[in-house]
Image (spheres, coloured by chain):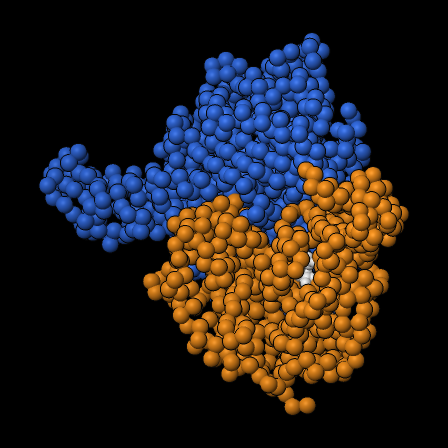
Amino acid sequence: MKNNIAHDSAIKHAMGKAIFIDDMVEEKGTLHAYLGLSKIAHGEIINIDLSEVEKAKNIICILDASDIIGVNDISPMGLLDEPIFAQKKVEFYGQPIFAVIGKSRLAARKAAQLAKIKYKEHKAKININDALLAGGEEVTPPLTLERGNTEQSLQQSKYRLKGSIRIGGQEHFYLEGHIAYAIPKEENEMIIYSSTQHPSEVQQMVAKALNISTNEIVVINRRIGGGFGGKETQSNLFAVIAALAAKKTKRAVKIRPSREDDIISTGKRHDFLVNYDVGFAENGRINALKANFAARCGFSADLSGPVTDRTLFHADNCYYYPNVKLTSQPLKTNTVSNTAFRGFGGPQGMLAAERIIEEIAYKLNKDPLEIRKINFYGENERNITPYHQEITDNIIAKLVEELEISSNYKQRREEIIKFNKNNKLTRRGIALTPVKFGISFTATWYNQAGALVHIYRDGSIMLNHGGVEMGQGLHIKIAQIVAEQFSLDLDRIKISPTATDKIANSSATAASCGADLNGMAAKRAAKKIKKRLIEFAKKKFSCKKDDIKFINNEVIIGKQKLSFAQFINMAYLARVQLFDSGFYKTPNISWNRDKGEGNPFFYFAYGAAVSEVQIDLLTGESKIKRVDILHDVGNSLNENIDLGQIEGGFLQGLGWLTFEELYFDKKGRLITNSPATYKIPLASDIPEIFNVKMVDWSKNPAKTIKRSKAVGEPPFMLAISVLQAISMAIASIADYKICPRLNSPATAENIFMSIERLKSEI
Amino acid sequence: MEYKKSIKFILNEREVELSNFSPNLTLLDFMRLDRGMIGTKEGCNEGDCGACSVLIGKIKNGKIEYMSANSCICFVGTLNGTHIITIEYLQKINPPLHPIQKAIIDYHGSQCGFCTPGIIMSLYGLFLQNPKPSEENIKIALQGNLCRCTGYAPIIRAAISLSQNDALSDDRLKNHQSEIIKKLQIINSEKTIIIHNKEEESEEEEFIIPANLDDFAKIYLQKPHATILAGGTDIGVWVNVELKKLTPLIYIGHLNELKLLQKNSDNIIFGSIFSYTELNKYIKQYFPDLTDYWLQIGSAQIRNMGTIGGNIANGSPIADLAPVLIGLNASLILRKGNKRRKIRVEDFYLSHNKQDLSAGEFIENIIIPLLKKNEHISFYKISKRKYEDISTISAALKIEISKGKIINSIFAFGGMAAIPKRAKKAEKILLNQPICEDIFIKSAKQLEKDFTPISDVRASKQYRMRIAQNLIRKFYLELNNEK
Ligand SMILES: Cc1cc2nc3c(=O)[nH]c(=O)nc-3n(C[C@H](O)[C@H](O)[C@H](O)COP(=O)(O)OP(=O)(O)OC[C@H]3O[C@@H](n4cnc5c(N)ncnc54)[C@H](O)[C@@H]3O)c2cc1C
Ligand code: FES
Ligand code: FES
């Protein structure tokens, strides 16, 4: 593979020497905080008795809402709807009410269980149905995307179909759970190590809670053990509590919930109920679509606004809807506030789009792929999205064709249909589904980034930028960019921890934009220094710019050859500034939410996958026999890192769509609160045959760093092919004439019940 | 009684002697909090994620065998006379990377890196046992290691590359075995060990390691309120998740007398502390139909640690061995002091969480009748995720055929009632009937009279019932070799 460069921490990971926050040597006298959580989903607190908690062994003190010096709120949108500690009102099972500070984590954890809290319980809205029945209160204003005349076109369509799909949520299950470690310094100053994707937001939240200015707080992390969106806003709670506790006790305080409490008290992927009404022609081409996307948002807004917006932005996937009306319904429920998760609402929109395609195919008794192709956006016409952005970089038709041939889709589909005719107990299915994913934060102001490059006298470089390394290989990609500017070996470059005192107002490392934004910023910083170095060399050696070359750790000036270190030291002695910053903001994007119009995305990333599955008709169990992926990463910055994102994203998507199931009981308790009950994919769940390829002819037409494309989120949605393949296997029961309307996740039970339903419908 | 007051084990290259610790102290906490060994990670603290994996070396027949284990649910008291290998052991290797580490790096097997030390330890355990594992073996060895980032593909590629060239040919651990065995043999005590936790003098905090089976029987009779600790895979979860304080603990996992293995013409008899892994070989040999089911129990780590006796004694309605043993018509030898009695596994389960086990009594041996030629049995485990998951339902379905007719049947189910239970009405329909689909369908129908399953986090009651019925049908179809 080209540029076979490993993750910057690969060796440290493998040796057990990579330091995560819980691995840091603790400050003397470090204390430990533990959360006390609500035991009901909705109600009022009548009385809190913490006397037993306080009396417990090795306990220092209690922390509750009365200890909050500043504002009791961690709503990322500043909506005052998400208290740090619930005060009177409890809005979900697992909501933090207090924290207890002890000499050891175990002591604090055990003491927290001794709380006696009396509640007056209210009726709780647990799921989407409950919320709709209770009147459909929303946590944030909904969005409408509209183009053409949908009502009329629906009526005029030759065929019209209505249906709905239920889409389950997902727990992030980052392997390193939430953790924060606050160390008080002089006066108001405090350093907080936080496992977060958004150090700047943590910094602001802490400042707000402590009622001090932001410049007193430094938030740092070197790496986090997975995030997937689950540490975009959800880290705020833990960091703020650690900071409040550190303030109160004047000691360093660490907080790390148990896996169960982490799962119960932090948000997840939104579940959805999508109702659709589609009109189409004889050949399967969609004429009009009306769809409503109701989401379980939980008790507060958190990021539900932008998440459900992105659902609508991706409800077209790769398909042109001549007339369309899409609405979101961000519902309030008495459950934990749902949040960002890889794809950020996009996967749910796309899954609905693919369901609609399927409906049409089974209605017309055609191969769903045929319906997909006939509805693809055109390259120069039929290329306006429901949000009125013109798509100018569409490569999906070519990409799908290449995959269709390389995976031998047609022939395999025929063979499968034959297999299904001759098998009583098992059935197979195959599906090819495409992905188009819009890149940029839809909150336009987030599309900015900064970086710092320091060159020291020995020629070594310290690199810093606003992005967080959570496994995605961001740091190495950016180091590569800087190394290339000076033609240096990577070991000359040190990536320093992400810290809010280095880059101010950094955006969350999210929306797949980490490398696009920070990479560009780092390049600009390096270029500024390089320019100065060239100016210096020109004068010093009286030569032209073209005579100066940075090659292989050396600087060649005319006939002179200097090591980079020698050259740098020379520049230092000549008083050349050897450090600088770079800033980048994504050009050409805009978004008017009120109108539902704009160009929110800088470009699109594309991909497609073919999955083949087998199901057992007697039990509903499924297995994945083969998956072929062709994915577009533009001109890859690091193929191995990108491959890792594709394979890893796919498997995470597969878990979401098959056996990862969130189960809340009637009282709103999340029962799947541990790895014993919430099952994420294992090594044995990967497809028996797994072929992953990157498109080798794609270059990003948008001017991104080296014309690469973002890769963090898009591959997640390739797994939709698995659900659709299962659906085809089920559809075989009714000779592919009835759409199985398989909801997600396709657990064995769900598959089995769909089989039964189809049997009863023939 | 005269007893010793400390335990000794080897932690990587260092000998550790401990005499004062909480009986519920886990190896993971000991390493991370006491010793500052932070290479091993905590991902769940309940045996499910493998981030805390280490190898535990134990002497068996003069050799030392290293097995992967979850240090988060492994109590320190169980380590007397063992050799613990952690990721730190591989930090001292010359040249600085072990072949497994190098492969993981070369194949880009780490992203966030939090799972990586655990994955490397699991692979290390695998390669020590089997230098040329198949892709299947690799996936099985990794059943207990969650990775949320990589999708496992690069890790599997790395492991396959290792299996193709003798990766552990010059392994430091292998080269030092005789030396380590000598050291461990000296440690192994003839005396009972009792560890007190001096920080908690008010309470009776004890970890007891009996010297032999008779001592254990005696001590347990004197302290019937104590908790027997075998593999600790259930108890570890109670302590870490439910925050139970369990004391005194009496450890039995080292008692060789409980590793009896005998075979006569009718039965196979084995001691209660065999781990799933240790029995693997015999299962394959005597009950080949059970092989796949066996790999669906827990993960590699759990199968290395967990014992047969613990699974039976725990009495969970979804303990996977219960239907198996009922289906095989197995019995238990229970022992109390010096008194023994025999009880059929089927009769052992009384009601939810209540077993026929009196104070001071424990499971000594398990007796399984060998299958007769005319007996046919199948085992099924249905779970949300195929591997390393708790059963939604499990079943052992057996019939005995004579002259074309069914003369005996046992349909044992887990997950269908408050205890593992036979479907007697469904069984009865089959008696003296020929083997035809109709009769099995009729039998399946009877399940509605045998059971009223519940809905819970794993499945609805409807699904449970329908699948249980379909398993009976599947059993028939498989008997007839239909696909
Ligand atoms: C991650 C994970 C996955 C698991 N997966 C499965 C699974 O797939 N299927 C399944 O069935 N189980 C599973 N388990 C549960 C557990 O591993 C098994 O039940 C195991 O066999 C218990 O044995 P142990 O030796 O570890 O028991 P311990 O934890 O040591 O003891 C369990 C109970 O049995 C008692 N006990 C132990 N030995 C005896 C004896 N000889 N006489 C009397 N009482 C005794 C103990 O006092 C305790 O009450 C899983 C557990 C974990 C943590
Ligand atoms: S920490 Fe997850 S298995 Fe031990
Ligand atoms: S690399 Fe992140 S969990 Fe495996």
- Where residue B172 appears, x then y in whole percent? 40, 67
- Where residue B344 appears, x then y in whole percent? 80, 65
Give the quadrant of residue A654: top right
**Most foreground residue, B400 or B425:** B400
Q: Residue at x 80, y 51 (%)?
A: B402
Q: Which chain is blue?
A: A
**Most foreground residue, A253 or B354:** B354
Give the quadrant of residue A16: bottom left
* Residue B12 visible to an observer of this rendering: yes
- Where residue A738 appears, x then y in whole percent? 71, 23
Image quadrant for the C terminus of chain B? top right
Q: Colour of chain B?
A: orange
Would you say B377 lies left or right of A10 here?
Answer: right
Q: Is residue B132 above or below residue A528?
A: below
**Most foreground residue, B87 or A536:** B87
* Residue A352 visible to an observer of this rendering: no
Q: Residue at x 83, y 39 (%)?
A: B438
Question: Which quadrant contains ligand 1?
Answer: bottom right
Q: Residue at x 72, y 21 (%)?
A: A162
Return the residue found at the far bottom.
Answer: B2
Would you say A30 lies left or right of A106 here?
Answer: left
Would you say A632 lies left or right of A749 here?
Answer: left
